[in-house]
Image: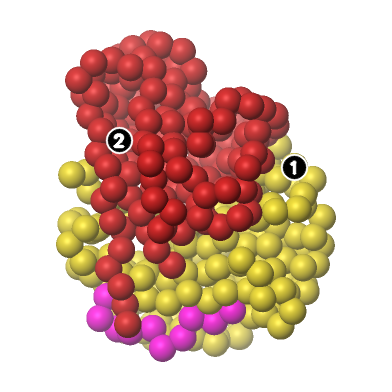
Amino acid sequence: MPTTTYTPLANITLGTAASSITFGSIPATYRDLIVIFVGAGSTTLEGRIRLNGDTGANYEYQRLSGNGTTGSAAFATSQTSGFLSSIAQATTTSSLQMTINLCATNIARRKVIVSRADNAANGTDAIVNQYTGTVAAITSIQILTSTGNWAIGTTAALYGVIA
Amino acid sequence: MLIPLGILATAGAGGGGAYEWIATAAGDGTTTSTLTLSSIPSDYKHLQVRYFSRSTANTGTFSMRINGVTTSSYARHELIGSASTTSSTNSSSQTSIQYLLGTAGSGAPGQSYRGGVIDIVDYTSTSKNKTVRALYGGADNTQTTKVALLSGLFLDTTAITSLSFIVGSGFFEGDTRFALYGMRG
């Protein structure tokens, strides 16, 4: 029997510029979690992600990027946060949209994140992250900047998907 | 509330019953070389598969077939990032849509899997060939890392009633999941 899913769990809109947006107390009910992000930065920055508040060197990623002139790719390991966006984000009027799919978040395996970042004024990214920290369920997700702040009005929504 | 997107933008999806979990095919590590999602109902507009995968063998590839068709009815293009290299590939007259390096293999670190999201648009049409698109990959660093945007084609106008995922070698490990969702429109 089909089951309605893609359940809205939380929706955050910044009333004050902030260096991160955090979803906490995430129930372990859902197999996948999805974050839909629309926002801008206060300066040129990268979008990053942390799980369960882990600031250790427990993230690795492979990215594919285009800036309108050049395509590029990079792999990095032992990072202190995952990678979401390489797009320079220098204005508050140019919006960055990210769709972040966190796979198997309640299964005792390493977590995989596949995501897209799109900003027509600057470029686009396709990225896969692996979290090499605890295999415990994800209970918090932090979307942070590499420097500076997410601008006022930046919005992030968290959804849970069962399987 | 933001309109949830995943890969596919569907107006009004999410929350109000427009996105439904239909079925999941799971690996067991001993018998599941093929995972099939069958008897797919015809009352959705689009389909989405969300997967998480590891193989028992040292292979990184799995394939997808539609309606059990094994003839040369498939084609695909990919845009790939692997280490510091970008590339693009294409293949036609294939007997399946291959997801190269789409699954972790036995050479990957323990507990490492690979994942992705696969969209199939307008799957019930009987006048159009079927388009598949995917974002997938893995960053487990003892195997070749990869992130890819894939566009696949099934040269057949028959409505889709089944999807099969075939591991390149060995079996799909336990905790491997191919979960099918339907989107109404």
- Amino acid on which the number 2 mark rests in the picture: Ala
Which residue is painted at 41% across and 58% down in the image?
A30
Which residue is painted at 37% across and 76% down in the image?
B22
Which label was assigned to residue B141? Answer: 1
SS under mark 2:
strand
Local packing at callout 2 (Cα closer than 10 Å; few below 14, some 14-19, many 20+) is many
Q: Where, quadrant-wise, is the C terminus of chain A in this rendering?
A: bottom left
- Amino acid on which the number 1 mark rests in the picture: Asn
In the displayed structure, A65 sits above or below B75; it is above
Q: CA distance from mark 2 to mark 1?
A: 30 Å
Estimate the x, y position of residue B23 in percent, counting from the top left.
43, 77
Note the chain letter of the yellow one. B
Question: Of B53 and B73, which appears nearest the observer?
Answer: B53
Give the residue number, with chain letter if any, for mark 2: A156
In the displayed structure, B170 sits above or below B54; it is below
Boundaries of the magenta span? B35-44
Question: Of B78 and B103, which appears nearest the observer?
Answer: B103
Q: Marks 2 and 1: which is nearer the front?
A: 2
What is the chief secondary structure element of the magenta stretch?
A: loop
> Is A20 part of what is drawn in magenta?
no
